[in-house]
Image: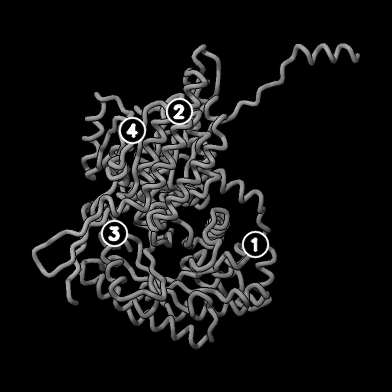
Amino acid sequence: MASSKKAISKVTPRLEVKKTYKLYINGAFPRSESGRVYEVSNTKGGFIANPTLASRKDLRDAVVAARAAQSGWAKATAYNRGQILYRIAEMLEGRADQFASEISLASGVTLRKAQDEVATAIDRWVWYAGWSDKLSAAFGATNPVAGPYYNFTIPEPQGVIAVAPAENFLAFIDSIAPAIVSGNTVIALVPGSAAVAAMTFAEVLATSDLPAGVINILTGLHDELAPWAASHMDIDGFDISGIDKKKRTDLKVAGAENLKRFHHFDGAISPTRIYAFMEAKTVWHPIGV
Amino acid sequence: MSFYGIVDGSESSLKRFLAQLPGVDQVGAEARAAMLATRSIKTTSKRWAIDTAISMVDLTTLEGADTAGKVRALCSKAVRPDPSDTTVPSVGAICVYNDMVAIARTHLDAIGGKHVPVAAVSTAFPSGRASMEVKIQDTQDAIDAGAGEIDMVIDRGAFLSGQYGLVFDEIVKIREVCGERAHLKVIFETGELVTYDNVRKASYLAMLAGADFIKTSTGKVAPAATPPVVLVMLEAVRDFYQMTERRIGVKPAGGIRNTKDAIKQLVLVNETAGPEWLTPEFFRIGASALLNDLLMQRMKMDDGYYASPNYVTID
């Protein structure tokens, strides 16, 4: 008996525990309302995971969560927002190896390249964290006006921003970090195989002091979700960097109804990515009163 | 005195009648309510449900900070919930504190809202802790000011300590004050009644005493209008109709904040009491935030894209 048991354990590998990836909405991990999933495989066709195929109802729920969280997040001091972004970098650093192996597995890049990508992503969080308390100095102004007034221009966050990044981890980070640092809340529409690392990143967020609803992550198809996000009246801006060029015009037309702001970026980090989803408020204050 | 030939109003007759009511199967009621909540209502049915729900809303403001201006704004919204869309029906009623009744009635009449009644919360709402004289005066005052519906609270302390006669007499007296001039809704505050059995007993007690409507809650106590509680009350009005041929209305209030919740309530009504109850005459939803969500869902169905709270009024 003893010898046969030994033989079995030799030929039977341990069963792998595959993770079920859900969505990240309002600080929780709900399943899709639709119950749908899709398959992510490695470059050789081997099964990796079943991320959730989010539906437009999930998008609607995410918008409600993002809207509810927005005023509180915008009211947090710039100092506090910067701390929290830095905290995300810290938590990401602690799990860098896991991210590198997941990215390498899902996208087929070498482990070395994946490690570089994760390191860059961590650096981006630190970089954007530093911007939180410099925005009003960089983009605000005291304006000379012809009258007995002080005239200030103050940059304010727009509100709820949807982002549709390209199918890689760095593009995902590059779309959300600049959107939230100013006080916006975001709904990220993460496509295809990028879902795996994005949902692991949601676990980082869940343990990093970020208030619930500030970042919401939906995985699935841009073609399915982006038109609904574009026409949604309660989304104020849309980063369409990851959307096919030919499809951008239709989205912009759909978003015209609420004057939604559309932007796409070439990937370079820049404070203009932050300012893109801010708006200027001008205040007139009488002198001598 | 005889009430529907069922009780004579005495403590003993009430106790006897209420004691023989079957107990509520708690697990069964909760399971049935949960099962009915899974019904999916789509497209034209959903559109009908939204409009029906709008016409059933008792648009409510019961805050210490209420002002005449806020009440007038709410009245305007009650008559034309969506100023840009004339096909949206008026709501069922405006529900305000007593001192706001005259303001609401005058404003409604002035803006073409004669068809929208004003409901007043009376009898020392929300606690009900006042002497009978005060409660009667409170009610009379509201009716004189133009209230077409009186939402009274029962004395939960008396009910829970088994003084059914006391609770019954109070409802009877307020019924007399209302007479033909005002509809009477009786609020149980189900969150304080603790058990479904108590909800069933309170329902029969109020119906026998002459209530036109039975209402779950004041909106000041949680839990309020949970689906199983509404289910138990709907069963009570259905069975009471079979006993007496008199149709009593039901008004869940408190905690119904979005379209999904409202449609769940309509499903409960249809499947429990029956489609005869699916009119504002016999079913009302006490709410304030709900109306905006109904309007936004309606816009979504009309426009084909999701609406924003920026396009409905803040109330």
* Residue appearing at x 33%, y 31% in the figure: A267
Residue at image mark 3: B313
Q: Between marks 4 and 3, how big is the CA–CA gap?
A: 28 Å
Q: Between marks 2 and 3, how big is the CA–CA gap?
A: 47 Å
Please, what is the three-letter code of the amino acid marked with disc 3?
Answer: Thr
Other residues around mark 3 within 10 Å, as few (<14) / some (14–19) / many (≥20)? some
* For discs 2 and 3, the disc positioned in front in the rendered view: 2
Disc on res. B195: 1
* For discs 4 and 3, the disc positioned in front in the rendered view: 4
Quadrant location of the N terminus of chain A in the rendered image: top right
**Secondary structure at numbered mark 3:** loop
Have a look at marks 2 and 3 and say if they share a chain.
no
Nearest the eye: B98 or A71:
A71
Residue B130 left/right relative to B110: right
Q: Between marks 4 and 1, how big is the CA–CA gap?
A: 48 Å
Disc on res. A117: 2
Other residues around mark 1 within 10 Å, as few (<14) / some (14–19) / many (≥20)? few
Q: Where is residue B294? Give x, y as percent.
A: 36, 51
* Residue appearing at x 74%, y 14% in the figure: A12
Query: How many labels, in total?
Result: 4
* Residue appearing at x 40%, y 26% in the figure: A167
Have a look at marks 4 and 2 and say if they share a chain.
yes
Chain name for mark 4:
A
Q: Quadrant of residue B7?
A: bottom right
